[in-house]
Image: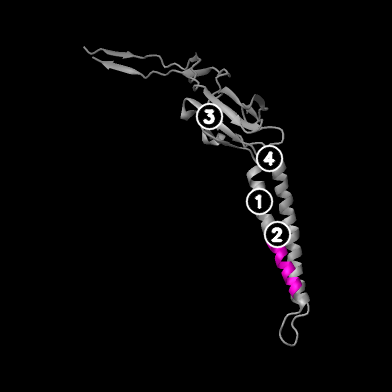
Amino acid sequence: MRHILTIITLCSAAALSSSAMASPPAPVSVHLESSVVADLEHRAGPDAPWENICVTPCDIVARTAGEYRIVGVGIAVSRPFVFDAAKGGALSVTVRPGSLAIARRGLWLLAGAGAIGIAGAITLAAGGASGAFDAGGVGSQSRTDFLFAGSLMLVAALGMGVWGTADWTENRLSRLDGPVLPPRAVSPQPDPHVTAPQQKVALSLPLISFTF
């Protein structure tokens, strides 16, 4: 006699409340120093407001979520960054503040270089058009003076341009030396200060059949 025993186990879509949260990453100890007074700020996300964390020099336990930046009186704002928690242990970071005054000087030098360069080019053109050559093939004194002055102005414009570019590029942002990364270089991690929402888990068991 053949008995067919069919056992149908639960195929349940009943939702189970779960508080399964990934364990938050360990906090990072950071020592921050700077040659001038600078503020470290933090925000939880791109649209969140910035909050002051400490004034250099300082030692903090840094959050592993969100992003940081450097600000201060008379210094340029840094790009947002995060501390590289993968380095482990206590991190040491040094701020290289950008000077707003020097950055402005760089812009003025670049503007001056442009103006002097244009004037030098006009002077050279005027020298080329004036008193070409005398009967002996020797350039007139006025022509020589124009060419010399124009060349001198172009050299001065080049020097000012190099100086202004260096001032601007080195000081338009504050920079950091140490284990820091741009925010996009790390995967998002949950902030341990924010409670994760409860998740619903659907449990499904297959149909099991025995034949005797």
Judged left or right of residue 16, residue 134 is: right
Across and down, in percent, residue 179 comes to: 51, 33
| Magenta-highlighted residues | 144-155
- Badge 3 or badge 4: first in the primary sequence: 3
The numbered dot on residue 99 is: 4
Residue closer to the observer: 51 or 201 = 51
Across and down, in percent, residue 7 comes to: 33, 13
Q: Residues within 10 Å of mark 1 (few under 14, many from 20)?
A: some
Q: CA distance from mark 3 to mark 2?
A: 42 Å
Residue 208 seen anywhere in this rendered image of the structure = yes
The residue lying furthest to the bottom in this view is 135
Judged left or right of residue 201, residue 1 is: left
- Badge 3 or badge 2: first in the primary sequence: 3
- Could you tell me the amino acid type at mark 2? Ala
- Badge 4 or badge 1: first in the primary sequence: 4
The quadrant the C terminus occupies is top left
Q: CA distance from mark 4 to mark 2?
A: 23 Å
Q: Is residue 196 above or below residue 187?
A: above
Q: Residues within 10 Å of mark 3 (few under 14, many from 20)?
A: some
The numbered dot on residue 157 is: 2
